[in-house]
Amino acid sequence: MKFFIVDDDEAIRSMLSEIIEDYNLGEVVGEAANGVPISSSFLCTKKVDILIIDLLMPVKDGLQTISELDPSFKGKSIMLSQVENKEMIGKAYSLGVQYYITKPINRLEVIGVIKKVVEQIKIEKSISYIQDTLNFLKMDTLDNKNSSKSSKGILEYSEFILNQLGIIAESGSKDLLSIVEYLYTRENTKTIEKDFPSLKEIFTKISEKKLGQSSSSIDIKKEIKASEQRVRRAVLQSLNYIASLGLTDYSNPKFEEYAAEFFDFTEVRKKMLELKNNTPLSQPIHINVKKFIKVLYIKSKNYKSNDI
């Protein structure tokens, strides 16, 4: 992975470079003291995968710099910040910044955040490669009418939503994509809204497909349990992510769009209270996995029909 670091403090730039190199996280291809030299074409020329940029800087700050980047820059942005201004942080979220490193710099936090971003980039590249391969194969076997009905399209929107929910890098996201694919195929014969399958059927079908027909019933049962656990962890992580957005800025666009759709809002508020007090509540937080899956599927279909 190639990094570019933008911060007006030379000591911060040096510390981040050392961490990235010492822990073999990637290569630092450049540094800047403010956002003036940063543009999408500049980052693309240097083949930057991850831009680490300070929120507040003289001349041109992080928010202005990020807002001026166009879609040609496909990399991820990590914001450095020591301020807790909800309005500024909310604006950063609206610009697509999903990752923060707080100042003063903590080595473990830096490593943890960067590893998570690197993992997400690798997953997205793998998914993109698989999609391109599937698309090529579909072109050879289906006419244009049939190919537009393939599951590839809806999976792209599912990935987009999972990314918005903050869990595209979670292992359970792969299971969720398999579930969407199964539901899409199943809907060719049954209407999902009126005949939504049970969780048992869903996890059984995706486990059988993953392991193959020759697998033993014992192995399939183990995979079903493992898949259920991965999905549940992913949904819990998403709840944590969405609740943290709402806690920072109640008007955050992602919080407004996804909190009540994917979760029972009572549970979202409980999680926000738990995060605020940094103490687990006496009553456990409940998640509705079936609701999450159903909303993910239907919302992915809606995105697909609206051709976002």
Image: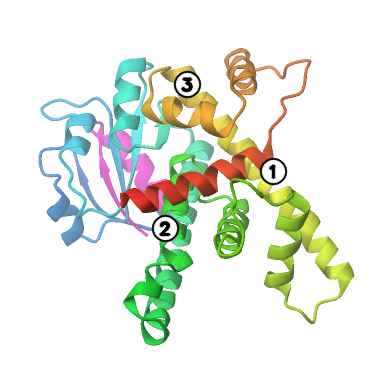
Position of 262 compared to 91: left or right? right
Inspect this view and state whether residue 114 appears.
Answer: no
Is 87 rendered above or below residue 43? above
- Identify residue type, mark 1: Arg
Using the image as rendered, state which of residue 121 and residue 22 is in the foreground: 121
Using the image as rendered, state which of residue 170 and residue 146 is in the foreground: 146
Position of 285 compared to 146: left or right? right
Question: Was residue 7 drawn as part of the magenta stretch in this picture?
Answer: yes
Sequence-wise, the earlier of marks 3 and 2 is 2
Question: Was residue 210 drawn as part of the magenta stretch in this picture?
Answer: no
Extreme right residue here? 218
* Residues at circles 3 and 2 in contact by the CB criterion of under 8 Å: no
Residues in magenta, as a range: 1-20
Sequence-wise, the earlier of marks 3 and 1 is 1
Is 285 rendered above or below residue 250? below
Which dot marks residue 211? none
- In three-dimensional space, the C-alpha distance between marks 3 and 2, rounded to whole angstroms, equals 26 Å
* Residues at circles 2 and 1 in contact by the CB criterion of under 8 Å: no
Which dot marks residue 232? 1
Residue linked to disc 2? 156
Extreme bottom residue here? 140
- Identify residue type, mark 3: Gly
- Quarter occupied by the N terminus: bottom left
Residue at 32% over, 38% down: 96
Residue at 63% over, 18% down: 266
* Crowd around label 3: few <14 · some 14–19 · many ≥20 (10 Å): many
Q: Secondary structure at mark 3?
A: helix
Position of 8 compared to 240: left or right? left
Residue linked to disc 3? 246
Across and down, in percent, residue 115 comes to 49, 50
- In three-dimensional space, the C-alpha distance between marks 3 and 1, rounded to whole angstroms, equals 21 Å
